[in-house]
């Protein structure tokens, strides 16, 4: 299975758009892996996770053919994860000769409602080929070679229940866990009951080396380590599981080299924009 991180920042990007703090300024000077766009990933070049406004740039930077994407999974309706209007350009006179005529979109009700609002002028030629699947926590859906299971995120619970996902395909299992804080007990119990063994897991690390506590809507390495330990106890994470941190805020001071040093003490790798893995 191929997995690629396209964007690895929180909502404001890193460096943040209007920020003049020393960390954002240092990131601008260093460039490279210190430049992070809004959160998005892709599996096997055909299953896209989240749809921020940076999607266009991600496609250009990584030479992606997004017309080949069969499925889009959306975690929640915040703008750094779902920019509904850009879906209007998937067809009509905006896009010709699509490799995949239809694209399936897996999301919660709030995401679907936002699509109906923000893409209200979408051409029927485009909208007829967007197939929405509104999913609830602990539900599973099979689309092609993928089994997609939604879990409730500790993030944006009212009025919307944000989601994170387990993705299974061809004997491989991914845990895609952001935006979320420390997992709810029901999530740990569900993962254990299903007997999942993750080949790859990526965790929200918005606060980097700070401590968020177990009630906040994001995590740092402290909370990640607690989640990993809990999942190890149930056998869902093993010594073979690839563990990555993702979704960094400039408020966590996530200059790449320094973050890698911190992450090493927790046994977790640090993602960066464009990082591609195969497992």
Image (cartoon, rainbow, N blue to C red):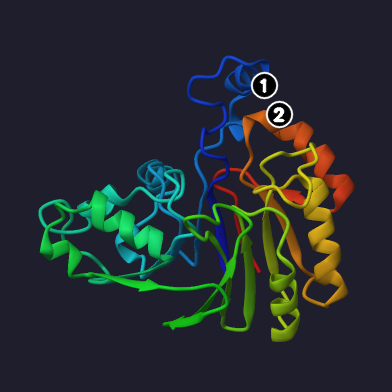
Would you call the spot at circle 1 few (<14 residues within 10 Å), some (14-19), or many (20 or more)? Answer: many
* Residue at x 34% of width, y 62% of height: 112
Q: Return the residue at label 2.
A: 253
Q: Tell me where residue 225 sits by quadrant.
A: bottom right
Asked whether 21 or 95 is in front, the reply is 21
State yes or no: discs 2 and 1 in contact (Cβ < 8 Å): yes
The part of the image, by quadrant, that contains residue 212 is top right
- Residue at the spot 29% in from the left edge and 56% down from the top edge: 115
Vertical order, 152 against 28 (above or below): below
Where is the C terminus found, in terms of image quarters?
Answer: bottom right
In the depicted structure, whether residue 23 falls above or below residue 182: above
Q: Label 1, on which residue?
A: 23
Report the residue at 22% width, 57% height from top. 90
| SS label for mark 1 | helix
Residue 270: x percent and y percent?
71, 46
Q: Residues within 10 Å of mark 2 (few under 14, many from 20)?
A: many
Q: CA distance from mark 2 to mark 1?
A: 6 Å
The one nearer the camera, 171 or 234, is 234
276 in relation to 273, above or below: below
């Amino acid at each position: 299975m191929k997995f690629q991180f396209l964007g690895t920042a929180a909502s404001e990007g890193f460096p943040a758009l209007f920020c003049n703090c020393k960390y954002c300024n240092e990131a601008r000077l260093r460039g490279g892996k210190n430049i992070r766009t809004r959160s998005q990933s892709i599996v096997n070049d055909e299953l896209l996770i989240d749809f921020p406004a940076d999607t266009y740039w991600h496609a250009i930077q990584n030479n992606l053919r997004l017309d080949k994407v069969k499925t889009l999974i959306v975690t929640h309706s915040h703008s750094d994860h779902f920019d509904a209007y850009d879906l209007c350009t998937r067809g009509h006179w905006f896009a010709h000769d699509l490799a995949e005529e239809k694209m399936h979109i897996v999301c919660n009700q709030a995401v679907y409602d936002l699509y109906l609002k923000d893409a209200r002028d979408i051409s029927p030629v485009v909208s007829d080929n967007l197939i929405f699947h509104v999913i609830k926590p602990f539900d599973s859906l099979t689309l092609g070679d993928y089994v997609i299971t939604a879990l409730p995120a500790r993030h944006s619970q009212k009025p919307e229940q944000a989601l994170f996902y387990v993705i299974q395909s061809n004997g491989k299992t991914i845990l895609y866990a952001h935006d979320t804080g420390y997992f709810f007990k029901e999530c740990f119990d569900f993962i254990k009951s299903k007997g999942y063994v993750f080949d790859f897991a990526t965790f929200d690390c918005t606060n980097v080396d700070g401590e968020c506590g177990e009630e906040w809507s994001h995590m740092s390495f402290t909370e990640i380590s607690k989640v990993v330990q809990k999942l190890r106890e149930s056998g869902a994470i093993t010594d073979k599981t690839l563990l990555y941190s993702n979704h960094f805020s400039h408020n966590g001071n996530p200059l790449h080299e320094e973050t890698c040093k911190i992450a090493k003490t927790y046994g977790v790798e640090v993602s960066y924009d464009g990082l591609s893995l195969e497992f």
